[in-house]
Amino acid sequence: MGVAEEDLFLSLANRLIRLEKEITEKEKEKLLEYSKGKSLKQISKELLSAFDKDEIAEKAQTLIEKHCTDKACLVSDLSPLQIENFKQIAQQQLIETAVSTFNGKLNDYIEKVRQEHDQIIDSHNIDTFTKSEWDTTSVDKARVLVQGFGEYLEANKDEIQALSIFYKQPYNRRNVTFKMIKEVFDKLKLDKPTLAPHYLWEVYSQLEEVKSKQPIDELTALISLIRRACGIDNELKAFDKTIEDNFNKWIFKQHTGNHNRFSPEQMDWLRELKNHVVNSYHIEIDDLDYTPFDEKGGRGKMYQLFGAEMTQIIEELNEVLAA
């Protein structure tokens, strides 16, 4: 499994985590009938574990100990190559466990729930997202569409909370949540279906050089388009790239004059927080009770690592990542 496969698993896990927060208790109970009794949280954990080095190492250790017991040998007798082979076997088993949960009925049910909650997951290929195919648009028409998108945002900035923040209170961008962006998406889809985010991304590509790859998730594409239309960004770029750049600048600033302010373990947590913002646009203390944070000790572990700075770190990341 290469980088592409890892991205596929992580992307799907993040979207199922998001969907798990959206669905009702009744929908969760129904899902268990098709998922071998596993919740979306458990399914997401299995997807994440397939590429988690610690999980792979732990499972490999179990396989090694069993092998040595069966063969009456010592772990120290194994060569580095043999140990690496056990790690590969362990990862393959984790991957097979994660994949085995999915079946036709489960995929269909996730698609049905997705439609009700507008979470973009495709039932045919569970991590291939619906994308409209459009004819090549002329430059003139592209300009008209971009202008129309800007005018639509302007016309609704008093009505839709997220747009009001982007246009009138840009310093409050840290408070924009997934729910707010979804509100924009729902209204845009209803009022202006021809301004679909994936289509608009292609339209912008005909008017300016777009260096970023188009996001798979339409909501992620939409937030990038809004930032471009209201002038926050002077070029269209994927929101995850914006967050990554802002995160790196923040870390550099934190370490300037304060060498190694954050330990390796703290840095791992900060990256997890950053990844959460990539997919949910905002992070709150309560999010620490969900995957992947709960598997790492949740809010208690973060407090242990950052102490009284925990809340300040979260607030600061919300602010700087959305800058």
Image (tube, rainbow, N blue to C red):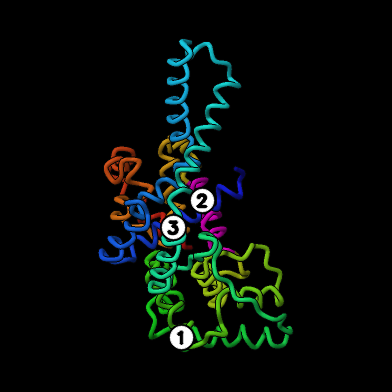
Q: Position of residue 151 (x, y in %)?
A: 54, 88
Q: Position of residue 170 (x, y in %)?
A: 44, 71
> What amino acid type is highlighted by mark number 1?
Leu
Q: Mark 2 touching mark 1, by CB under 8 A?
A: no
The image shows a total of numbered marks equal to 3
Magenta-drawn segment: 238-253
Left or right: 242 as drawn, with respect to 139: left
Classify 250 as above or below 58: below
Instruction: Tell me the quadrant of the picture where the N terminus can be found.
Output: top right
Q: CA distance from mark 1 to mark 3?
A: 27 Å
Counting residues from the start of the chain, the first of labels 1 and 3 encountered is 1
Which residue shows up at 48% across the image and 10% down it?
A: 73
Residue placed under numbered mark 2 in the picture: 9
Q: Position of residue 219 (x, y in %)?
A: 49, 69
> What amino acid type is highlighted by mark number 2?
Phe
**Considering depth in this image, is 196 or 222 the residue closer to the camera?**
196
